[in-house]
Structures are given as structure tokens and as C-alpha cells.
Amino acid sequence: MKIDPIHQFNIEPLFTLGHIGNHTIAFTNSSLYMLVAVAIISILMLASGTQLVPGRLQSVAEISYEFVASTIRSTAGAEGMKFFPLIFSLFMFICVSNLVGIIPYTFTVSSHLIVTAALALLVFFTVLIYGVAKNGLKFFKIFVPHGVPIYILPLVMFIEVLSFFLRPVSHSVRLFANMLAGHIALKVFAGFVAMLGFSLGAIGWVGGVLPLALTVALTSLEILVAFLQAYVFAILTCIYLNDAIHPGH
Amino acid sequence: MAESHGGAKGPAAGAHTEADGGHHGGGFPPFESSSFASQLVSLAIFFVLLYVIVSKLALPRIGGAIEARQNKIEGDLAEAQKLKDQSEAALKAYEGELASARSRAQAIGNESRDKANAQADVERKALEEQLAAKLAEAEKTIASTRVAAMSNVRGIAADAAGQIVRQLTGVVPDVASVNAAVDASLKG
């Protein structure tokens, strides 16, 4: 039996929506799972009660709310709450789509660089446009750190500018690579179980226990990674927005 | 920026999709630029949809619920504090009332005792005066009785002396001298 750990990342067009130029815009499996993520978040946030004593679903919704709100307050200050809907949407979208992606035979939206890059660029341009609109040219003080001797300032500024423009790259590749690598590893180890079972008979059934155990362990690790990468994406967004809000620091 | 990236690779990607047809395993899917446009469009649609739902409906709803709970808790705490203050005030008022009632009771007790004492004094004094008057009267009566008795004793003594003298001497003595002798012996 052939293991194809890449197959799970295929984009399958389900139906065509239209054309832009010579691009075919299709509703793909990726679109479907984006819709699923949006639907799950909407159900969680809108179908949960608003009782004084929260039920289970309402507790989850409130914990998500408080979690993201406290993350923003601690990293970007009270002014960062302007971006609460954006960061909440990013965090929930990535977290839910990652967690859904762990279920076998599903598709992981953030395992495609184009998706994570688009989200990272959204954050990048939000920071850039808001920073310049709010602070004007003072925004560019983020490239000039305090207390740096004048003779190494050009070098430091060069590094700062470079790192600023590389932010969307690291921001997007981190999420993409984590999801991609995790799913490939899961697929490979899970494939070993089937391969041993089908090819070696009884010995294979016994031998398959080890990769199965590893698959279980990796799955729990992937659940952690799915949440953690969404959190990392959100907290980096907060840190970048903090630069736009308080450029002097 | 992302869209222009997708656009740049667009034509090649379109050809690639047609060549690939139905079967997979050609390239590495995340780098197949033919799917970029579709993914970007669906991401834009669904992320904007999510953003609108989150910002217009979900966050106000959950935030409102959390705030309502916070307000309720604060209101209840304030209410409890108010009630506690009230009960403390009531306790203080009760204690004040009790103290004043106690002092009033003491005052009333003192007053009535004083009054009773005064009345008893008056009565006693009146009784004592009455008794003193009776005593004085009795003493006067005793004195007059004694005087009368004493004068009777003198008469009897004089008579007895006269008779004794007559019996002894056979001579009826002079009344005046008998009286004088009786008086002298009574004095002696």
C-alpha cells in the first residue's frame, strides 16, 4: 500500500464560482473547511446563551473572549482593544480550522502558505496603515531604537527595517510549516500502521502497535500545536500592532 | 501583494491544472499556484464574513453578557453593603434606644423611690407628732392624777393622823396643826 502524505493537502474544486481574468475561481475543499470554521465559530458565539450563570457552551465562548481580550490588553495595552474583532477573528479562525483539520479525512486550511500569507499580510498592512495614519512619520521611530551609539545606528536601522519587512514571512511560514509538518508526520506514522498490517500479516499487526502509539501521541501533540500556533499568530499580531500604537518603544 | 503574487504565476498555473486533469500527486499542493486565486477569494469571503459576524454580533453579545454579569455582581455587592449598613444603623439605633430606656427606667425608679420615701417621711413625722401629742397628753393626765392622788394621800394622812391622835390621847387635835405636821412629814 502506497503512502502519500501529501495527498491530504490537495485542493479539490467542488464547483466553479466564476472567473477573474483567466483564473477559475472555484469553491474548493479549502473553501468548505473555511466555511466550516466560520460556522463553528458562529454557532459557538451566537448559539450559546447569555445567562447570568453560564452553561458549557457559553463558558467556552466567554473563555475565548476573555482569553483574547486579556492577551491584547497585556501585549498591546487598552488601546489595542480597537483591534479586538480582528485579533479575535484571526485567533478563532486559525484555532478552529486547525483543530478541525486534525480530524482524519478533513482538510487543514492553514496548511497552505497562500492562506497564512494572506492573513499575515493583512496584519502587516493593518500595522503599517494604522501606524502611519495614527503617528505619521513618528511611526518610523520603530526603526531607530533608543540608546544606540550613532556609529552603529545605520547597521541597527538596516536590521530593524529588514526584520520589519520579513515579519509577514516569518509570521505566515511559522503557521504554515507547523501545520504542514505535523500533518505529514501524522500521516506517515499512521501509514506505517496500515503498511505493516497489510504486508506482514500477524507480525505486522503486533509491529503496528508502536507506530499506532506514536500516532496517538502525535495527535495529542498536534492538538496542542493547533491551539498554540493560533495563539502565537494572535500574540504576534498583538505585538506588531503594539508597534503601530506605541511606536516610541 | 498576495494577489499580485498569485496573478504573476496565474497563466502557468492554469495550464498546469488542465495538464494535471483529475489525478493528483503531481506537484506539492501548497505551492501549486493554480489554486491560489480560489483560495484567496474564498479566504477573503469567509474571513470578511467571520469578521462581520464577530464584530457586529458575537463580541457585543458575549461582551454584553460578561458586562451584565459584572454589573449584577457589583450591584449585588453594593446592595449587600447597603443592607449591612442599614442593619448596623438599626442595631445602633436599637442600642441607643435600649440605653435611653434603661436610663429612663432608672430615673423613674429613683423618682418613685424618692417620692415614696418623702411620703413615708411625711407620714412618719405626722404619726410621730400624733404619738408625741398623745404621749404629752398622757403624761399630763398622769401628772394631774398624781397631783390629785398626792393631795388625797395628804387628806387621808391628815385624817388618819387626827384619828390616831384622838385614839391615843382622846383629844381631838386641831386640824391646822395636824395638816402642818403631815405636810412636814411628807416633805421629810
Image: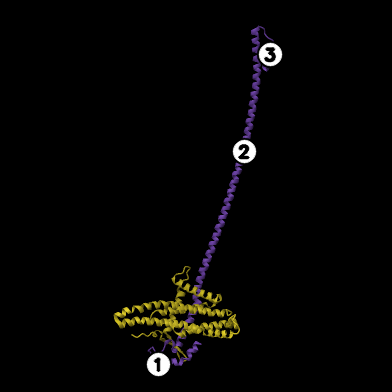
Q: Chain of mark 3?
A: B
Share a chain, discs 1 and 2? yes
Extreme-top residue of the structure: B170
**Which of the two marks, 3 or 2, is nearer to us in this view?**
3
Q: Few, some or many C-alpha atoms within 10 Å of disc 2 (few <14, some 14-19, many ≥20)?
A: few
Disc 1 marks a residue whose amino acid type is Ala
Q: Where the C terminus of chain A falls, by quadrant?
A: bottom right
Using the image, tell me which numbered label, if any, was put on residue B19: 1
Kindly identify the amino acid type of the residue bearing the numbered disc 3.
Ala
The chain in yellow:
A
Q: Are marks 1 and 2 in contact (CB under 8 Å)?
A: no
The colour scheme applied to this rendered structure is: by chain
* 3 or 2: tag closer to the N-terminus: 2
A140 or A154, which is in the foreground? A154
Which quarter of the rendered picture does the N terminus of chain A lie within? bottom left
Q: Which residue is mark 3?
A: B181
Q: Return the x and y of residue B91 as percentages of the image width and height.
A: 55, 55
| Residue A119 visible in the shown view | no
Label 3 environment density (alpha carbons within 10 Å; few <14, some 14–19, many ≥20): some
Percent x, y for residue B176? 70, 12
A125, A175: nearer the viewer: A175
**Residue B110 location in percent, x, y?**
60, 44
Q: Nearer the viewer, mark 1 or mark 2?
A: 1
Residue furthest toward the left? A202
Q: Is residue A140 left or right of residue B180?
A: left
> Which numbered tag is attached to residue B119?
2
What is the quadrant of residue A205 in the picture? Answer: bottom left
- The correct choice, above or below, for A43 with respect to B173 in the image is below
User: What chain is colored purple?
Assistant: B
Side of B26 relative to A84 (left or right): left
In primary-sequence order, the first of circles 3 and 1 is 1
